Image (spheres, rainbow, N blue to C red):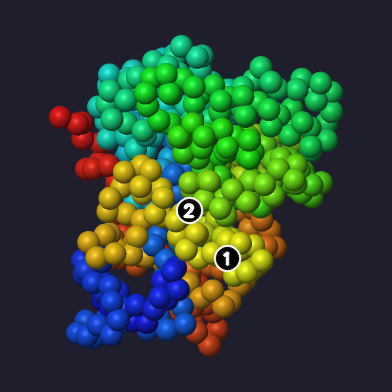
Amino acid sequence: MLIRNATLPDGDQRDVRVRGESIVEVGRDLDATDQHVIEATGKRLFPGMIDAHVHFRQPGYPHKETWETGSRSAAAGGVTTVVDQPNTNPPTIDGEAFDQKTEFADDSVVDWGINGGVTADWIPNVLLRRRLFALGEVFLADSTGDMGIEADLFADALEAAADNGVPVTVHAEDADYFNHDARARDDADAWSAFRTAKAEAKAVERACAVANEHDTTIHIAHTSTPEGVDIASEAGMTTEVTPHHLLLSRRDLSELGTFGRMNPPLRREKRRQKLYDRVVDGTVDMIATDHAPHTREEKDAGIWDAPSGVPGVETVLPLLLAEARDSDSGLTYGRVRDLTARNPADVFGLPQKGAIEAGKDADLVLVDTTETSEIRGETLHSKCDWTPFEGRDAVFPEWTMVRGTVVYERGDALAADTTPQEDVFYDHRGENVRGADSERLE
């Protein structure tokens, strides 16, 4: 297959040749000897996004999401690798639970990784022999799944992970700094008032200190404050920011209501703007969604009863591309590439992923950045039919390719000037990016 005249994220126009599962050549005016030629003049070609933080809810909660629906939603948004978190039922804290989850992951149309969890009941000597993507998110305060752990166990987990060469990601909130006076309120903003910005900053500081004491590094998940980002960066740790913390703030809660409840919560607008600045200037390492779907019925409850979490795997790259269209945002297409593909591949050690280069996996996304469309929850492919980004402009992919196979094509792109067709998903089996299924490491 030859993709002709595509504009890459750095602005250069190139031809890209794909053979089998890999990119074999990138250059100008390559000979059109391939049977299949895609004309991409005027369009941009991105490496597929690596979303290092999703909750696909299986096993335990298939009414919220499944690996089939979640991975299709990912593909429709240009995400070609997803990493599932351990707070399912049962939690992924031992070898049996890991093996069970890999069976569900067989339904994924995109490549995947599975993180292992840490609780008082985890079995590290068995779990860490599986082909884990990472350990974590290790919860320093309870969130969905009640997996918060004590300081001593966190230190033990860091040592075990380091001994086995497994990265560690951390959910950093310190419950000692929660504002319990906010419990007297019942408005949508009460959740943000309760789980304070200071609670995150203090937890990041403590987690980084423990990591440095054990001469290891950690990755801070869904960092929601500029203070947390700065503390982690100065300590030599990496961070991710979600699209909701990047683009939404507490001033949106009057409209979102309990549909805007998540952990960590939305912050004040000034903090959001400073967080955005750190995403633009390179301090933040990556964007990850913390895709955490719940049904409308579950979210339509009081602020203290509604579950935490919002969907995002299908809308994250389209939203970032729409931001990059705006020259005033400071976010470039090259920076979007780094945040979504190159940096996650580097941080988590995925040498075959993250770039449009000869020898890399052909994980590719073709977009027309001259056109935007409004996000509508009812047209997304997640089992969750709502989004906190309803009505926002986005640049959705025309097609998404995983290891040389087109797994998704957008209906109106297929139809060109005729009546729009249905979106098309093609049969494809994603693979564990750490190796062959759930084989034990020798």
Q: At 53% across and 46% down in the image, what residue appears?
A: 283
- For the question of whether residue 105 can be seen, the reply is no
- Amino acid found under the numbered disc labelled 2: Leu
- Amino acid found under the numbered disc labelled 1: Ala
Q: In this rendering, would 270 be left or right of 142? A: right
Question: x, y (%) of residue 426?
Answer: 36, 65
Question: x, y (%) of residue 32?
Answer: 24, 86
Residue at mark 2: 339
Identify the element where label 1 is drawn.
Answer: helix
Between 177 and 135, the one lying in front of the other is 177
Question: x, y (%) of residue 150?
Answer: 51, 14
Label 1 crowding class (10 Å Cα cut-off): few <14, some 14-19, many 20+? some
Residue at mark 1: 324
Q: Quadrant of the N terminus?
A: bottom left
Determine the image quadrant of residue 369: bottom right
- Quick check: 178 above or below 36? above
- For the question of whether residue 278 can be seen, the reply is yes
